[in-house]
Image (cartoon, helix red, strand yellow):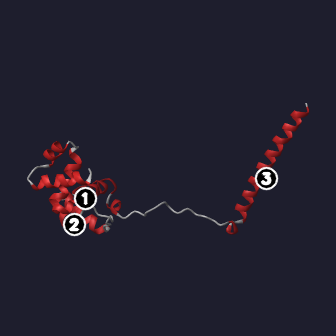
């Protein structure tokens, strides 16, 4: 949804309309409007402010909220209490917890995994000999093809 659409939707929420009615009036899908409505219920007009930095949450914090959610507490109330962006985040954590266990909530390393890079000067003797062997095999194969082509031209 565009910024203007979000502002119009929040103004409609403040007038007492529900997300389904607002989505119908605006002619947009109801799911983004529903998520905006949930954020509006939690933060009021603050739902229009987009967070620039994605917050990170500790393993213990996530685990405590998920356990309370699975014990039956409502996701919306827990999201407000924990300062989450939406109840959907808590539901995602709960799904991960059910699928992978508590370890699934631990922070994941960011970025591409580091590869072992060995500088040319730090190459082991065996690795250096393997590379030289590959180069020499390629050279022999090339020379064999060249010799075959020249023999074919002579005929």
Instruction: Name which quarter of the figure residue 129 lies in.
Output: bottom right
Mark 1 and mark 3: Cα distance apart in space: 60 Å
* Residue 6 position in % (x across, y down): 21, 53
**What mark, if any, has residue 82 been given in the picture?**
2
**What mark, if any, has residue 90 been given in the picture?**
1
Residue located farthest toward the top when viewing the structure as drawn: 155
Regarding mark 3 in the picture, which secondary structure is present there? helix
Query: Vertically, is 137 above or below 48?
Result: above
| Residue 72 visible, this angle | no
Question: Which residue is found at the position 17% from the left and 52% from the top?
Answer: 9
**Residue annotated with mark 3:** 136
Mark 2 and mark 3: Cα distance apart in space: 65 Å
**What mark, if any, has residue 30 been given in the picture?**
none
Question: Which residue is found at the position 40% from the left and 62% from the top?
Answer: 108
* Left or right, residue 11 beside residue 52: left
Looking at the image, which is closer to me, 131 or 43? 43
Looking at the image, which is closer to me, 133 or 29? 29
* Residue 123 position in % (x across, y down): 68, 66
- Bin the neighbour count of mark 1 within 10 Å (Cα to Cα): few under 14, some 14-19, many 20 and up: many
- Bin the neighbour count of mark 3 within 10 Å (Cα to Cα): few under 14, some 14-19, many 20 and up: few
**In terms of sequence position, does the residue under pointer 2 or pointer 3 come before the other?**
2
Badge 1 vs badge 2, beta-carbon distance below 8 Å: yes
Instruction: Name which quarter of the figure residue 23 lies in.
Output: top left
């Amino acid at each position: 949804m565009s910024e203007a659409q979000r502002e119009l939707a929040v103004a409609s929420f403040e007038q007492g309309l529900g997300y389904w009615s607002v989505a119908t009036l605006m002619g947009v899908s109801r799911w983004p409007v529903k998520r905006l409505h949930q954020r509006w219920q939690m933060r009021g007009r603050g739902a229009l402010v987009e967070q620039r930095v994605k917050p990170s949450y500790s393993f213990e914090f996530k685990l405590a909220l998920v356990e309370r959610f699975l014990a039956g507490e409502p996701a919306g109330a827990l999201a407000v209490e924990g300062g989450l962006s939406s109840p959907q985040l808590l539901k995602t954590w709960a799904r991960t917890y059910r699928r992978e266990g508590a370890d699934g909530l631990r922070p994941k390393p960011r970025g591409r995994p580091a590869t072992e890079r060995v500088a040319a000067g730090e190459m082991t003797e065996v690795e250096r000999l393997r590379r030289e062997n590959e180069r020499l095999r390629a050279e022999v194969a090339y020379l064999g093809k060249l010799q075959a082509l020249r023999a074919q031209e002579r005929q």
